[in-house]
Image (spheres, grey):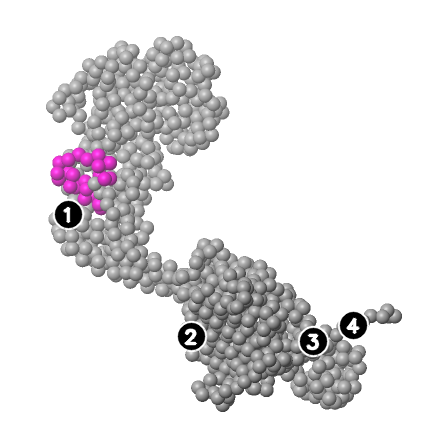
Amino acid sequence: MQSSNSRAKPRSEVLKIMEGLAQELYAQIERGEEPVLEIPSRTLSNTVWDEKRRIVVLGPEKLKRRLLDMKESKRFMQTILMLKLIVSSIREGVYPTIRDLYYNGKHTITFRVPNAGTIRENTWDDQAESNAAIEDLEVGLNVLREEMGLSADVKGKVVGPIIVRSKGFEIDATRMGDTALGLPPNPDELDIVKIEASYVLVVEKDAIFQRLNREGFWNKENAILITARGMPDRATRKFVRRLNEDYKLPIYVLTDSDPYGYYIYSVYKSGSIKLSYESERLATPNAKFIGVTTSDIINYKISSDYVIAANDRDIKRAEELIRYPWFRSEAWKKEINLFLKMKKKVEIEALSTHGLRFLHDYLLEKIHGGKWIE
Amino acid sequence: MATDVKFESLSPSEWFRRNKELAGFANPSRALYQAVRELIENALDATETFGIHPFIKAYMKYAERENWLSIYVEDNGIGIPKDEIPNVFGRVFYSSKYKVKQHRGIFGLGAKMVILYAQSTTNKPITVISAPLGSDKVYRFDIMIDTLHNDPLIKHQEEWDNKYKWHGTAVHVVMEGDWLKAKHRVEEYIKRVAMVAPYAEIHVKEPDGGVINIERVTLTLPTPPKEGLPHPKSIDIEVVKQLISRNGDSPLAEFLVDNFDGVGDETAINFLKSIGIDSSKSVKELSMDEVTHLVTKMREFNEWRRPRADWLSPVGAELLEQGIKKILEPEAVFATTRKPSSYSGNPFIVEAAIAWGGKIEPSDRPVIYRFANKVPLLYDEGNDVVRHVVDEVDWNLYKVKFPASLVVVVHICSTKIPYASAGKEAIADVPEIESEVRLAIREVARRLRVYLSRKEKEKEAMVRYAMFTMFSREVASSIASIIGLREDQVLNKLKKIISRKIKYLEAIEEVEDNAEQQQQGEA
């Protein structure tokens, strides 16, 4: 694997890589060997914290998937069927969604057994199976699905001092009114024409994003405002990373004060466990967490009307977080331990405990006063 | 005692007439079922025991009055000599047998109870037609029983030339009976009898027009039982007294050797010495106390030879399997006949079979078919040793998961079946018998497990082949489409790789199988 390769491969190169896999398998078959796929294993045990690069990456474990092994045969078939589907979509110049591919490849295959009836098997039963086949190809070939030209739901939207070009049209994200610029499935295909921001503020919640947009926060602060409406999708993460890596913009993340919010921050920053193989193209190790933190509940004297008792799932989640290597900084250990001690959580909206304008004051104090943690 | 009590003497026939429920004639439906089975069992005893393939007709129809039924049962057996017919059918306890042998009849009373019941409900005589083997004549007697004197009353008698060289016995009786209530029992009985007698041909006509025709599936007959002597551990005072009265003045040692199984000259003398009775003393000189002492010690003494099993006639594993296959039509059946064993001086043999799948209805626990001396036991299963043993079996060990199509058949034959209750429909929990039943069932269950696991493996191998082939087809078509080849160019090469892999996997499994079997063998 090439390290820190965040440039998208062109589709023509992707096609060659995918055809190469088919040729390699055919070569195995011609030699009379049982077809075998070698794929890095995507398990928690093979998820490794890269201390130097400060991201979650896939470990060295590889699994050999064999066509003639009862436990693997079907997955093997699914992977190669998906390979064919994607290869033909590239050849035909179409950009199917991952759901298109699911329907496209779904059919029933049959086998008649003498005296025992007919065995029927669906190529895949639900989209989780076809998605897994795509993920296998991504890891196995080191090609992201965006590079294969696949579309998926993108939740990310952007507003602020940035001008991009898409299919020849220039779009100025300062001129969106109360709306925002929606990110495309592969944001690397956006040309950034001009960018004059001093930092990027990523907010967990769409409602807060809308509020800050309408209240002109980004204009006053000369900042780019981004949300992915909850857990970030790959396109949003990729875009955030690009703004940091290519344009050296500081990234600040604002979430609710609960383990779920903390984890969202860590996905922007270090990558997710499920998609650790993409971290090096998606993670932004420099992202900083400005809040809301558990200590904010005390420091900002948040009224008990806004404070919610943590439930068992929150506690369990926090106990998991504290074991992740990327939450081992002193500041984070302090925050999570405080959470486990107080068993209290708050939403971003709790900041209106001191009036509706207080959110702005809070953000300015955190960002300009250096009161963030990472 | 000084009280003046008048004792009324009761003939055996009268006693049985008054206590008919004891012999299974309690009500019209039970009586009908009992009559059919007594007559069919007599017919089987008169044929297979003498090497004749049974051919039995049992015709039932409604008779002249409501609730009256006419029953006609005919066999092709050895027949009864003319002079014996009235006594055989008309006198209760008419028998010269003081020897032991396995036979079907639960009370040994057979047709006599049928006659008593018939004449007490319809006041009609029984008709017996019989011709012994090689007889020139066929004889007919219409008989009733004089219950007061326990004597046969001959109502009518005739004979004619045996033109067709027929031999056998036919009995016709008119009695009260409830066919609708008895129907199910009778049919179940016939089905089960046929299960342990696949060499028999049985034709049944029912009063409402139903017909059951059971064809013979084999000409092999079980080895008939020999007649033998009782074992000293199995006797009681009454038997010994009867034997003494028939042995005049033989010396005691000779009496023991001649009349009992498992007693040699030396053993007899040692035994008598050990209990302090002179071995040359004549049997008729024994006092009542000495007889009691003798019998008690005979039962306690442990140096007799083990009882012989020559007087038993098991069905045999092969015949049992054939019978079960014919009646239940299972997918597979496994049967075994254990070696003879004994309890309290009575020899017995346990046979067991397991039938699996096919036309057997699935149920939540094993269905049990029980037999004692080839007679089906239909009732009181909950009290039977076989049910107890079957319930203790952990069927998971034998790869059986319920609901399952599983039938357990157990046949116990003995010169004396230890029944659990007066109904004589359940066998008691005698430890020796229980242990043999358990061993027999385990043995056939193990064979079932081998069968089921082989089947499982075959199915796995088939599924594996199917999966590999169908997934390979899909893979071949995908690869071919990507690199621009025809599907069969890839698939044909892939097929060779599949068959090589499958052979390889099968070879591995065979090695594992052998290792497993060896382990089980050692355990």
Q: Can you tell which of label 4 and label 3 is closer to the viewer?
A: 3
Residue that mark 4 sits on: B7
Instruction: Pick the quarter of the image with the N terminus of chain B.
Output: bottom right
Q: Residue under mark 3: which chain is it in? A: B
Q: Residue B31: give x, y in percent of width and height.
A: 58, 66
Q: Which region is colored magenta?
A: A80-103
Q: Which of disc 2 and disc 3 is earlier in sequence? A: 3
Q: Identify which residue, A99 or A87, lies in the foreground.
A: A99
Query: Can residue A99 be found in the magenta stretch?
Result: yes
Q: Which of disc 3 and disc 1 is earlier in sequence? A: 3
Q: Alpha-carbon distance for marks 4 and 3?
A: 15 Å
Q: Alpha-carbon distance for marks 4 and 2?
A: 54 Å
Query: Can residue A152 be found in the magenta stretch?
Result: no
Which element type, helix, strand or loop, lies under badge 2?
A: loop
Q: Which amino acid lies under the numbered mark 1 shown in the image of this protein?
A: Ser
Q: Residue A46: give x, y in percent of width and height.
A: 34, 41
Residue that mark 3 sits on: B148
